[in-house]
Image: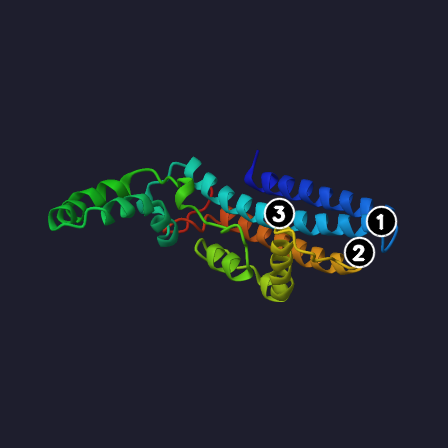
Amino acid sequence: MSFDQSIENDLKWREAELVSLKRLAITAPEGSISRRSILRAMWAILYAHYEGFTKFCWDTVFDHIQSEGIPKRELSENFSLISMERAFKDLRGRMDSASLLRFFGGELSAIMAEKAEFPEDFRLKTESNLWPNVFERESSRIGLVCAELDNHRARIKTLVGRRNEIAHGNGVFINTLNEYSEYENATICLMHDLALRTIELLEERSYLAERQSPNN
């Protein structure tokens, strides 16, 4: 399956689940405990899809590059640095002069010639609380800039904050379906923007040190 189809399919099933839950909420009497409980659950699930889809897009980028078997030295600086994180971590554990000389005298060149890999421990992190600043910081590490984040930053911040309150069992309630929908629309807009930016990055092969056309 192509990366663009994979991203589209992942987004579709998440949206379908949110639509299904909204239909369930509509059937519950307005103002009832059932309606309020469903809205709380929907809020938590909306956040889960926001975080889950973001991580899916990030990982799709890394998985695609890794599958191409590209040497680290042929990647743009940001991706090359991420692929080198394990080697840098090992180096930090042996900072004596002899180790540094070996690393910069020969090991570095050999490592840069290896095919790029992106172990899970060194990939982008949602930190289990994907605040707008975390989304922005981590996405920018691989050149993903989503304009929709600035359009909906306050709503995304509220989404994360209320989700945390719900997750900790606190009595935070979403009053109406319209209130929920406002935040769902903002979140979906950001997710769509992320999908487009991810596909664009991969199609243009912006992860290479020197841009190459797909036919090269």
| Residue at position x 11%, y 47% in the image | 98
As helix, strand or loop, the secondary structure at mark 1 comes to helix
For the point 64% across and 62% down, which residue is it? Answer: 158
**As drawn, is 172 to the left or to the right of 214?**
right
Identify whether 23 is placed above or below 148: above
Which one is nearer the viewer's eye here, 43 or 81?
Answer: 43
Which residue was labeled with disc 1? 26
* Relative height, residue 182 to residue 27 (above, below): below
Distance (Cα) linking label 3 and label 2: 18 Å
Query: Which amino acid type is shown beneath numbered disc 3?
Result: Ala
Q: Nearer the viewer, residue 91 or 149?
A: 91
Q: Identify the secondary structure beneath mark 2.
A: helix
Of the 4 image quadrants, the one containing the N terminus is: top right
Q: Which mark is residue 177?
A: 2
Q: Nearer the viewer, residue 158 or 166?
A: 166
- Distance between the alpha carbons at the discs numbered 3 and 1: 21 Å
Coordinates of residue 137 in the picture (x, y in percent): 47, 59
Contact (Cβ within 8 Å) of mark 2 with mark 1: yes
Question: Quadrant location of the C terminus?
Answer: top left
Which residue is labeled 3 in the image?
48
Identify the image quadrant of residue 110.
top left
